[in-house]
Amino acid sequence: MENRINFIDIPLDNLSMSETIDKINYAIINNNQIHHCVINAGKVVNMQDDKILKESVINSDIINADGMGVVWAARFLGYKIKERVAGIDLMENLVELSHRENYKCFFLGAKQEVVEKVVNYYTKKYSDKIIAGYRNGYFNEIDEEDVIKQIKKTKANLLFVAITSPKKEIFLNKYKNELNEVSLIMGVGGSFDVISGISKRAP
């Protein structure tokens, strides 16, 4: 991909927030799929020993620098990274885009009361028309196929997965072909907890 660099043996896309959103919007318009992922210092460290996590990350279509540690390290290595593209900020922008363009979002992850608060928050802020569906993140491997069927049934354009790493990365990499009608699939970590007010965003 143009603007992709090699960051200590990890592909990293040197894209601004607006460039990332434009690429995702283009994929939605053209019924293509983008598997989006972010990396921060902690994930980079874990990827050194977790081969399945690393494979799941490097197989993504867009990999943004979420943490400033990655931005600074890349700059130290001689790459002029445009900006940090935090997952929670990207999700917020994409939900707003969904409101403007009549896209539908599926929210997967966190506790039931948390994901319900997220859905209620966006329903009040925008409209219930952007909500394709939602489900909590408490399921086992034997339940995964049912979760995938639930998502596919809603015909969502965007899927946000708020499950801890490395489970979310492995889950999305494992099922992205089955979710090929969903134009954006991305992990958003603890974003639901922040949006719902359960926890504060890390500085």
Image (cartoon, rainbow, N blue to C red):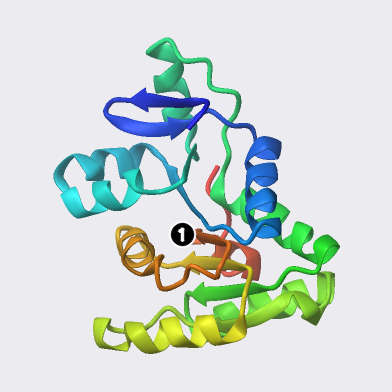
| Residue found at the far top of this picture | 78
Could you tell me which residue is drawn at 37 percent across and 33 percent down?
Answer: 11
Could you tell me which residue is drawn at 25 percent across and 46 percent down?
Answer: 54
- Would you say 186 lies left or right of 145 here? right
Establish if 107 lies above or below 82: below
The quarter holding residue 176 reads bottom left
> As rendered, which of 199 and 32 lies closer to the eye?
32
Q: Position of residue 79 (x, y in %)?
A: 46, 15
> As rendered, which of 154 and 108 lies closer to the eye?
154
Image quarter hosting the C terminus? top right
User: Badge 1: few (under 14), some or many (20 or more) residues near its Cα, within 10 Å?
Assistant: many
Q: Position of residue 200 (x, y in %)?
A: 58, 57
- Would you say 112 lies left or right of 178 here? right
Could you tell me which residue is drawn at 19 percent across and 39 percent down?
Answer: 48
> Type of residue at label 1?
Gly
Establish if 144 lies above or below 170: below
On the image, numbered disc 1 is attached to which residue?
A: 189
The reply to whether residue 135 is in sight is no
The quarter holding residue 121 reads bottom right
- Would you say 147 lies left or right of 159 here? left
Q: Position of residue 89 (x, y in %)?
A: 64, 49
Q: What secondary structure is marked by label 1?
A: loop
The reply to whether residue 113 is in sight is yes
Establish if 183 lies above or below 69: below
Could you tell me which residue is drawn at 70 percent across and 78 percent down?
Answer: 131
